[in-house]
Amino acid sequence: MDTLAPPTDTRTALVGLSRSELGEAVAAMGEKSFRAKQLWQWMYHRGAREFADMTDLSKTFRAKLEDHHIVGRPAIAREQTSTDGTRKWLMQFGDGQKAETVFIPEDDRGAVCISSQVGCTLTCRFCHTGTQRLVRNLTSAEIVGQFMTARDSYGEWPTPNDERRLLSNIVLMGMGEPLYNFDNVATAMKIVMADDGIALGKRRITLSTSGVVPEIHRCGEELGVNLAVSLHAPDDDTRSAIMPINKKYPLKDLMAACRSYPGASNARRITFEYVMLKGMNDTPAHAQALMRLVRGVPCKFNLIPFNPWPGSPYECSDAATVQSFADMLLDGGFSAPIRTPRGRDILAACGQLKTDSEKLSAKELRERAAVAEQTWAEKEAAAL
């Protein structure tokens, strides 16, 4: 059973502030601008979680920081490690809401799958997250904080060089639609990409969208990260049936946005994600239609065996069907690897993420906050 969280700390988190915002926070405390650079390096290069750890800052400055700010990390409500090495964290934020983050290890590297929302705006029929209503967008602090917490777990501070990184990539493929929270996602990723901090290059970051057409070009222009598109069907009727967003942004518009994605080339191809649903999208006719659809787009496919979840209405295509589908795409000149499911035993695989966070009314939030405040006060009084 979950316990009540302590009242929200009213101090401002420094993690998640842009470089200019961090400078403003330092100036507001009457400190010189170089202090912002020191803080940045302590947080994002060395991974300091407390101001007391920042030993080259004066005691006076550290006291000011403690009065007005926190460094800022999500709390870990639950951590699970799969039999295949995949690790999943249930992150809890200051208001008690939660989102899931997953690390998918390979032999000498791995990707951290980060969430951008609590719940999801969309209602894709095959996705467990889509059965949870959108609660709210995550802040830039909560987005970058997920990667930092994963680094804490694996002891990857100070920032290692590329040759020694285990957490080598970020995929924005967790809970939520990143392009419906683009400003916060962009701020977080610019922090991640800064050379004097976490220093993860844009080629190591992949943003996955269900097809929010108006924001796709902006993503390429402002971030230049790799683009992945949740496609899952080669025609509007099928795609609309499993992905209602297609009714707003049909395939014609989506393909036009992909063709004009800044930086897309044969060297940097767009990834089309395609979950294999038995009897829905897995026939030879679907494969042929798919190849016609993406003609002219520098792309590759990522075929995803459907990962079941409690109450899911679909089945995964059988292995022979998936392999035949992949072979047809390969014969047509397209790379189409079949993703190996990871973390199924802890519901950490693609499409399986969900939390118990609820969308609450303002009255309900006030009532819960009041109860939490009273309970916390009682605990503190008892401890005295």
Image (cartoon, grey):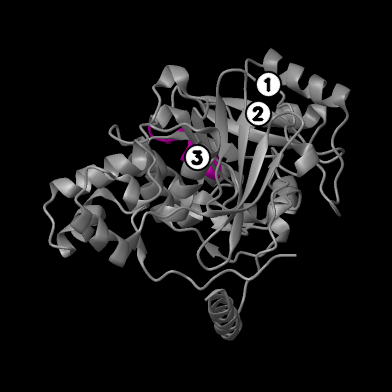
* Magenta region includes residue 122: no
The residue that label 1 is drawn on is 337
Q: CA distance from mark 3 to mark 1?
A: 32 Å
Q: CA distance from mark 1 to mark 2?
A: 6 Å
Q: Relative to 43, does residue 94 appear above or below in the rendering? A: below
The residue that label 2 is drawn on is 302
Element class at badge 1: loop
Report the predominant secondary structure element of the magenta stretch: helix
Pair 3/1: label in front: 3
Mark 1–mark 2 CB contact (< 8 Å): yes
Count every numbered label the image shows and give the total: 3
Tell whether 32 sits left or right of 152.
left
Q: Relative to 165, does residue 100 appear above or below in the rendering? A: below
Point out residue 317 in the picture as x, y percentages from the top left corner: 85, 33
Point out residue 291 in the picture as x, y percentages from the top left corner: 65, 26
For the record, the magenta segment spans 254-262
The residue that label 3 is drawn on is 152
Element class at badge 2: strand
First along the sequence among labels 1 and 2: 2
For image coordinates 44% across by 17% down, the residue present is 163
Q: Relative to 35, does residue 92 appear above or below in the rendering? A: below
Tell whether 23 sits left or right of 266.
left
Question: Few, some or many C-alpha atoms within 10 Å of disc 3 (few <14, some 14-19, many ≥20)?
Answer: some
**What is the three-letter code of the residue carrying label 1?**
Pro
First along the sequence among labels 2 and 3: 3
Q: Is residue 306 visible?
A: no
**What is the three-letter code of the residue carrying label 3?**
Asp
Residue nearer the viewer, 18 or 77 = 77
